Image: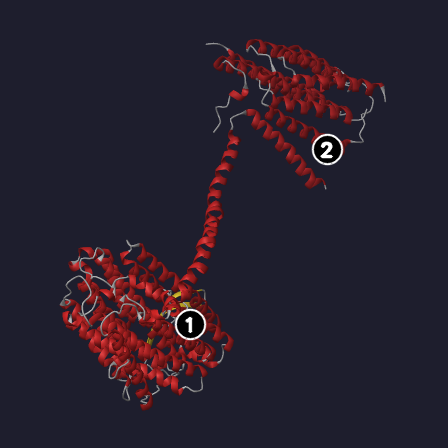
Amino acid sequence: MKELAWLVPALPLVAWAVILLVGKRLPDGGAPVGILAVAVGWVISLTILFGVIGGADAYHTGTSWAPIGQDFEIPLGMTVDGLAAVLLVVVTTVSLFVQIYSVSYMRGDERYTLFFAKLSLFTAGMLIVVLADNLLLLLVGWEIMGVCSYFLIGHWWEDPANARAAVKAFLTTRVGDLGFMAGIFVLFWAAGGFEIERIVDGVESGRISSATVTLGAALLFCGAIGKSGQFPLHTWLPDAMAGPTPVSALIHAATMVAAGVFLVARMYPVFEASGAVLNEIAIIASITMLIAALLALVQDDIKRVLAYSTVSQLAYMMAGLGVGGYSAGVFHLFTHAFFKALLFLAAGAVIHAVHSNDMSEMGGLARAMPVTFGTFLVGALALAGIAPLSGFWSKDEILTDAWLATSRGVAQVVFVAGMVTAFLTALYVARMLWLTFGAAYRGQGHPHEAEAGILFPLVVLAVGAALAGFVGLGDNSISTWIQTPLLPSEGPATLNLGLIVAATAVALLGLLLGTALYRRGLPEREYLERLPLVWTTLQHKYYLDDLYERGLVRAVAGALAPATYWFDQRLVDGAVNGAGLGTRRLARGLRYVQSGQAQWYAAALFLGVVGIAVVVTQLVGR
Amino acid sequence: MPLLYPLVFAAFLFSIGVYGVLARRNAVMVLMSIELMLNAVNVNLVAFNAYLRDQLVSGQVFALFVIAVAAAEVGIGLAIVLLIFRNRETVNIDEVDLLRW
Amino acid sequence: MTGQEVAFLILAAIGGLAGVLVVTSRNVVHAALYLVVALSSVAGVYLLLAAPFVAFVQVIIYVGAIVVLLLFGIMLTRAPVGRRVLDNTLRARVGAFVVGAGMFAMLTVFLAGAFGEARIANRAATTTAALGTSIFRNYVLPFEAVSVLLLAALIGAIVLARRD
């Protein structure tokens, strides 16, 4: 079955093309095509994963894509190892259920068919990233995802705010991509090829100098910062909520933003070889998880709470990787995909029912939408890290790794940040739960339970969110699945009783506080408003957006862009037009050769004679 | 006398003729300038003949032939000018540019 | 400075001046008459160069026939008078001057370089008999050819110029 792994990205790619070309004429607007493509991929992915669990070896195949000269070629290949198998299942599962959900959620939308086409293309892109065996192919998938994110965020582009959000997402990740590409080329130049295996080999064998490794790793991480919304390139994620909720669930919770984490995991031997970069990752992750959790606490838009939560949880994953917990980070990626996608889809159901994103217009929905409430609760508690739900196991794994990695000074920072964030997470989760589902309804309409087409994916994902954590236990745990010769398994999840108690206590504390504060719904003034400085800073998102806007955007759009435009218009176009104009002028001049006037010809003749005489005598005489 | 004297004189007449051919608009004037040029050539020929003291006096013979040919050429040239004048009422040669682009 | 050279210089001056006036005169008929002067001075030069027969032929044919032909042409084409009509545009004249000057410069430089030291020796004039002998003994073929040429020119001119 591993040989067929290439089908998993290929089918959605074909589906994209089909839907794009003939989708409107197909029954139900082409959605079944997309769903079928990803469903087949899902089955294949599950089969592969079961094979890996059963102890199958990694499978690598490839073909030469673009041979250049005699010695060099750009390869096209895939690596189907444990890490890829896990991600395959994650991506196809979430994509499948998001697409099923979208059939109901996006019904009646003007660009329904195009939506499914975009989702399929995006899925294909992410799957390419997962399977790629060389960095160039990975970059291709990476960029496909970037552009699809742009298209999907801007799905309702009639509202200029949505279009701006799409551009912001694209450009911010692009900034990270610049570093990413530079990193790819540094490593390519150092290792002599794009293949990940070759690069890892070069690093391990010491052929590549440690300075180069550090540089390459740091640059690669830039791409991860952008795509995974780490500080300072996290500003695009909350704005990306302008897109439809299924998009938020698929792209900005479970898959695309996880690509950065996946990249670090995939290239982990390179990162491990450079302690400095791992420390950098840990520090940035710690900062990110704290600032994002604080911001989640003061949002009124339910999707924005979830967006900042995603940033914070991604930071958790990065932090895990940063302290040497390879399998811990991947484990959290796995569980987070389930419960965060679930939360977004459930939030979407709520938004659909209430016709608003604003939590100040919600409340008391537990009675009106019981199934939605139930699934949302499962996801929320998993997010908060309450045992035995999935989030508990993976979060605990990361905290344990941070606690035990005493060799790294940063590990202590990560541990403290992780504990504080756990508290804050529980706090904003409780706030979100009570404001949305508790107390009395504050809105205008008549909310009712969502339809079956929406509830079905919710229930399935809730089961996943509840049970996914158990893959971390036992001898054949996720850690075993994703191990490679260079990254041996760390064994099942270490159960440090003291830590478990501490973490659970912290989470329960947060939940209790949140309940106490928000039990009766939205207060007159938010509690944090009592600290005006804190409040304003949080409201302005630490002024980062303003900084970027004033500093970078103005400089580029105000100065650099017009200069480039002038250059393009005058010099580049001028050269092109000038070639045409020059030819015409030359022609106009040459016309006189055929003036029809004998005297002109005679003049030319005599001049020619003089010229020839001079030339000949000069050449011959001397 | 130095050979250079008649040679420079011939060159001068020739250049004057060139100027006349190129600068005059009237066809008859152009023909006159051509005659000047031909005369210059003749002077050249005769001068060299005198210098080289040719047994066959070929310089002078050649000069005679040139005169004969010049006469023929003027005859035909004027016939053509007359024809143009009859057709176009003008003898400005810059108005005879049918072969232009 | 021998008498020969003095005579030559005078004749050359007259001829040169006349030539200049031919090409710059505003009146066509005046130009034709200046041409007569120029051609006559050339005939004088021939005499100085020991070629009396050529000088006489020059006068008879050039001055006598060709200039008359040109005058007829002027008459029949009602050649107008005035600089604007007779001369080309200023741009063309400047160009023509450049070409002419260039031609003169080139010729003078090369001739001076090649024949700067040469002198023509004094000798007796070529007799007509000697000339005739040379033509009919050595250059008979060109002679006949020129005859045919003249015949062709004659017929051609008639054909071209007749009215029908």
**Above/below status of A204 relative to A246:** below
Q: SS of the residue at dot 2?
A: helix
Which residue is nearer to you in this view: C22 or A54? A54
The amino acid type found where label 1 is placed reads: Phe
Residue A561's tag is: none
The residue to which callout 2 is attached is C110
Instruction: Give percent across and percent down for residue A514.
Output: 27, 76
Quadrant showing the C terminus of chain A: top right
Calculate the distance from the C-alpha at mark 2 to the C-alpha at mark 1: 80 Å
The residue type indicated by label 2 comes to Phe
Residue B88 or A88: which is nearer the viewer?
A: A88
Q: In this view, does A127 lie above or below C71?
A: below
Splitting the image into 4 quarters, where does residue A290 fall? Answer: bottom left
The mark tally for this picture is 2
> Where does label 1 land, which residue?
A221
Looking at the picture, how far across and down is residue A96, in whole percent?
22, 69
Residue A98 position within the rendered picture, expressed as x and y whole percent measured from the top left: 22, 68
Residue A48 shows up from this direction: no
Answer whether labels 2 and 1 touch (C-beta < 8 Å): no
| Percent coordinates x, y for residue C115 in the rendering | 77, 31
Q: Is residue A309 visible?
A: yes
Binning the other alpha carbons within 10 Å of mark 1 as few (below 14), some (14 to 19) or many (20 upward) gives many
Instruction: Point out the image quarter for the N terminus of chain A.
Output: bottom left
Q: Which colour scheme is used?
A: secondary structure
Query: Is A537 on the left-hand or right-hand side of B33?
Result: left
- Position of A291 relative to C109 (above/below): below
Local SS, label 1: helix
